[in-house]
Image (tube, helix red, strand yellow):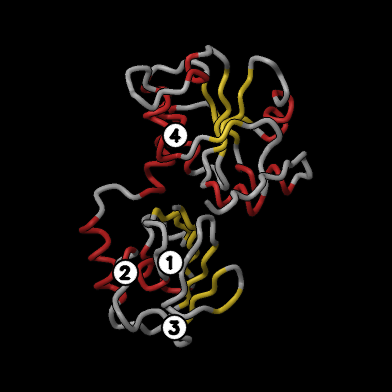
Amino acid sequence: MIVTVRLYATLRDLTPDRKGVVELSLPDGSTVAAMIARLGIPPGVVRKVFVGGIAQEESHVLQPGDEVGVFPPIAGGAPGMMAARRTLTMKLKKGVRQMVDEAKARITTLSLEEARARHGKDDVVFVDLRDVRELERDGMIPGAYHCPRGMLEFWIDPESPYHKEIFASGKEFVFYCNLAGRSALAADVARQMGLERVCEMGGGFAAWQGAGFPVAERPRRRPA
C-alpha cells in the first residue's frame, strides 16, 4: 500500500529534496511504528503523528492512501537527527522523489483540462492504479479501468498468465493515482515495456476531485 507522509520542521531534512513529502510504500497492515522505522527515523525523534488530521499512537494501523503528518519534539532538538539522515542516505542510492522526477522527464503528463477533454473518448482508457480500498473510500473517475499498481507489469505482458487484453487494444492509456507519483512510475514502466500511447494525469485523482470533475462510487466488496 502507499501512504503520503509529510515530515515537519527538522524532520524535513530526512527527505532527499528536504521538502518533507514522501509517498511511502508499506506492506498492508503496517503500523505507524513500522512507517517510522521504514523512514529510518531513530527512537525519540518523533513526538507526534497525525493520520488524517487525528493524533495517533505508534500502534495505529495505517490504511492505503492515508495522509500522515510527522512532527519532531517541539524544541526541534533531536540528537539522532543527523544519524538518521546518514542512515537514510546509506540505505538509499536513489530516493522515490528522484525516481518520480526522472520518470516524469521521460513521459507525457496531461494537465487536468487535457485529461478532462480525453475522458469518455472511445479510444482512450483511464487506468486507476490505486489500491481498491482507496477506490471504495474516495470513488474513481467514471469508466476508469482499475489496475492495482502491483499488477501492472503482469497485466501488460502478453506472455504473462495474468495478461489483460485491454492492454493489447492499441488504445491510449491515461494513468492516474492519488497524487501523480505512482502514475509517473507506472507510465514510465509501461512505456519501457512497449505501450506506445501512454501518459499520466498531472495532479492525480485528488486534483481531479478537487476540480469538481465527475466521480463515480466504487461499491465495497462483500465479505466472502
- Residue type at tag 4: Ala
- Indicate the quadrant where residue 105 lies: top left
Q: Give the structural element (helix, strand or loop) at label 2.
A: helix
In terms of sequence position, does the residue under pointer 2 or pointer 4 come before the other? 2
What residue sits right under mark 2 in the picture? 37
What residue sits right under mark 3 in the picture? 47
In terms of sequence position, does the residue under pointer 1 or pointer 2 come before the other? 1
Measure how far apart labels 2 and 4 are at the Cα level: 26 Å
Crowding near pointer 3: few (<14 within 10 Å), some, many (20+)?
few
Q: Of discs 2 and 3, which sits in the foreground?
A: 2
Q: Nearer the viewer, residue 57 or 208?
A: 57
- Residue visible at 46% across and 23% down? 164
User: Are dots 4 and 3 in contact, CB under 8 Å?
Assistant: no
- Indicate the quadrant where residue 89 lies: bottom left
Q: Of discs 4 and 3, which sits in the foreground?
A: 4
Which numbered disc covers residue 186?
4
- Residue type at tag 3: Arg
Crowding near pointer 1: few (<14 within 10 Å), some, many (20+)?
many
In terms of sequence position, does the residue under pointer 3 or pointer 1 come before the other? 1
- Residue type at tag 2: Ala
Instruction: In the displayed orientation, state which residue is furthest to the left.
Output: 90
In terms of sequence position, does the residue under pointer 2 or pointer 3 come before the other? 2
- Residue visible at 69% across and 16% down? 122
- Residue visible at 66% across and 42% down? 140
Measure how far apart labels 4 and 3 are at the Cα level: 35 Å
Instruction: In the displayed orientation, state which residue is furthest to the front.
Output: 224
Q: Position of residue 28 (x, y in %)?
A: 41, 57
Measure how far apart labels 2 and 3 are at the Cα level: 14 Å
What residue sits right under mark 1 in the picture? 12
